[in-house]
Image (cartoon, helix red, strand yellow):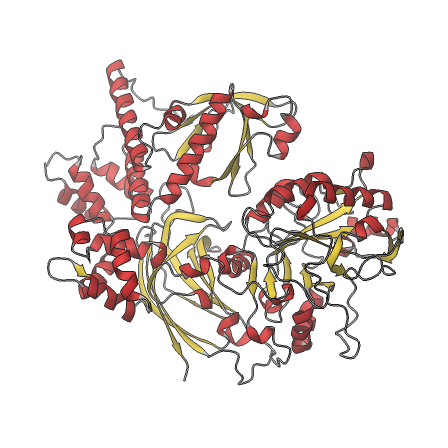
Amino acid sequence: MQCIRRQPKRTASQENILLEQSRRVAALNGIRLGLKDDKDLKFLLKGSQLLKVKSSSWRKERFYKLQEDCKTIWQESKKVLRSPESQIFSIEDIRDVRSGHKTEGMEKYAKDVPEYRCFSIIFKDQRKNLDLIASSEDDANHWIAGLGKIIAHSNSMNQKQKLQHWIHTCLRKADKNKDNKMSLKELKDFLKEVNIEVDDYHAKKIFQHCDKSKTEALEDDEIEEFYKILTERKEIDSIFQMYSDPEGFMSCQNLVRFLYEVQQEEDAVVAAPALIQRYEPNERAKRGNAMTKDGFLMYLLSDEGNIFNPSHRKVYQDMTQPLSHYLVSSSHNTYLMEDQITGPSSTEAYIRALTKGCRCVELDCWDGPNSEPVIYHGYTLTSKILFSDVIKAIKNYAFQTSPYPVIISLENHCSVEQQKVMAQHMTTILQDMLLVVPVDGNKSQFPSPEQLKGKILVKGKKLSRQEDPINGNNNLEAEDVSDEDEAAEIEDESVKTKVEQKGKSDTLKLAKELSDTVVYCKSVHFEGFDDPSHPRAFYEMSSFSESKALKLAQESGTSFIHHNIRHLSRIYPAGWRTDSSNYSPVDLWNVGCQIVALNFQTAGTEMDVYQGRFQDNGFSGYVLKPEFLRDEQTKFNPKSITEKTWGTKKKLLLKIISGQQLPKVNKSKNSIVDPKVTIEIYGVQQDNNKKQTKVIENNGFNPNWNEEFTFDIEIPALALVRFVVEDFDMSTKNDFIGQYTLPFTSLKQGYRHIHLLTKNGDPYSSSTLFVYVNIQDCE
């Protein structure tokens, strides 16, 4: 039996001293956040009782409190043997704080409580929402406003402030006896906390260097000295020295030279003074129109020093071309939170997809009880949600991330009666958002994303004997149309049995009311590429399984490109992907397929590449295809590249210099990461490539690689670059640490920081790679 060693009980005066220290630390962190003496922050630091809601029968009181680091929230738990770590969640993990009944849980289980007392915390990862009820409106407002302020202020901190905040939090954590001093043992614990393995000799050497008072403990200025040693960036110092004078100042003229010669910034003369004003912390240097080492580091860590071109964070492409000329961010079976067979369906999945920039969402509609259509994955055990609730969620979130059109892709299995209910819900809930008539009388080609701003389009079946959707309708009430049943393609025995029992019909009776909601996206079966003498109407579009689409791309690439200039094509995952895995979208983008639908709920390489492509053009969900995928005369075929004008071939030189504050993958105290970086190129077949650095052992805090790689890029307009950092493991699969993917055309040259993203695509607060980029035209 293991004995538990009890901590000696503190005296009342010791408790008071610790309490006062804790208040001081909290006040200091409040100042760092720019929230000095903020009443909401003070309320959160004090904490309050809240009712946690899980179901109609589970509603329990728990105490919640913001910790002194102003970064984490402690929640009371009644579970036995629950670890202290599991009772804490970070502010950085919060995606959104919603007031009122704005989640499924609140809608179902808290309708009896006034909205003004309710709020929900939405997390970035796949964690369940935290639905809470405050005892009063004031308490709820404190929590909503306080959390909102902390999130906003944390996001607006520069990298140096974030680093300082993080290191001081780790220092506080390592200070076990809370005496605001650091012993040699605590220093070694701290180094492990920040992901560095230092042998006893080096730890002692650092300690003795900083311990100026010779008291065997570091305090105040000595801890600051230790902080400076720890955060030194020698690789940046050496760059700075090449352009600075002996006094440590980089003149504006030398900054212009650096920006122009190294960073390849064309507007260097205008940019240099603005960068000094924005990032230089030293007032004397600022007055002299010069930059110190600190200012230079601040610039390199800022958006202007990012590897992703900051001008591409805004919509910069021509948005007045026909809709079919754009790649469109699209989700498959959007309602699913997990797998395709037994997982939950949720309106939250639509909200998550739309806030990630998705512009085409899918609704599988079936007859539900009480004449209310439901959405779920037919023939499976996935849960059901109301069609009307999904339409409300789409209305509320469609244009929060992007103003450009949203396409509702309907897979309709409903009776005529419930189809009429679907049409009624869409027209009454979406109102003017729903596009029901052609734009500006355009009858020969698609309108543009610009013309369709703020509009929701329906993709679905159209009555065949109706007049075409562009020129008006006749009075037909309902008739049979060909059925589309992607759920029936699932490779699962229980699903196949249910499909056979149902006796699948090839036709479906379609209600005129639902047919009338379809204007520009009429679903038709693919019968082959157009006969030039009898072209299909531009608004007719087909859906292809990934295997069918890849076969067409392989065998008839140029024909597929021509088809996709005039028509929309939607691609969906193969039926065997019951685990909601994804396929690579790249080969399908290369032949101009617009609506390449992925399972947004599944993290991984495919989703990283997807989000990398769509962070371009202001994260609008629409990316203009290259000219050679829009030109009616194009002969481009990604499977056989010939010497044509598909853009100048490029040589990419990448130097992976160093990493900063890589997160611990294994939370065990003694586990330190062994990082390595892999650079992956995605594009046409000739461009696909992968190269990797050596492994740096036991250093996730500031590993140095200094390794150069070159890549030949045949078709730059179609290429993407992905940087992946992994924790190397000799015996098992490497653990993922972070990644960043961007289009080749969005790369900035020179010395740049890459701000790494988590597995779910959210930014880490201060994990970066430092690299050098150079792009040359090939001879």
Find residue 605 and report its horizontal and vertical position in percent: 53, 58
Residue 346 drawn above or below residue 464 = above
Find residue 238 and report its horizontal and vertical position in percent: 21, 62
**Lateral position of residue 160 relative to residue 668, left or right:** left
Residue 89 seen in the current view: no
**Lateral position of residue 77 relative to residue 222, left or right:** right
Choose top left, top right, bottom left or bottom right for residue 268: bottom left
Q: Residue at x 84, y 51 (%)?
A: 512
Q: Residue at x 46, y 33 (%)?
A: 86
**Lateral position of residue 507 relative to residue 654, left or right:** right
Choose top left, top right, bottom left or bottom right for residue 154: top left
Residue 669 seen in the current view: yes
Towards the viewer: 496 or 332: 332
Q: Residue at x 64, y 65 (%)?
A: 324
Towards the viewer: 593 or 381: 593
Find residue 675 and report its horizontal and vertical position in percent: 38, 56
Instruction: Identify the image quadrant of the N terminus.
Output: top left
Residue 359 drawn above or below residue 623 = above
Find residue 564 and report its horizontal and vertical position in percent: 67, 70
Residue 184 drawn above or below residue 499 = above
Towards the viewer: 574 or 491: 574
Instruction: Identify the image quadrant of the C terminus.
Output: bottom left
**Lateral position of residue 355 relative to residue 496, left or right:** left
Q: Residue at x 36, y 33 (%)?
A: 70
Residue lying at the far top in this picture: please name it: 12
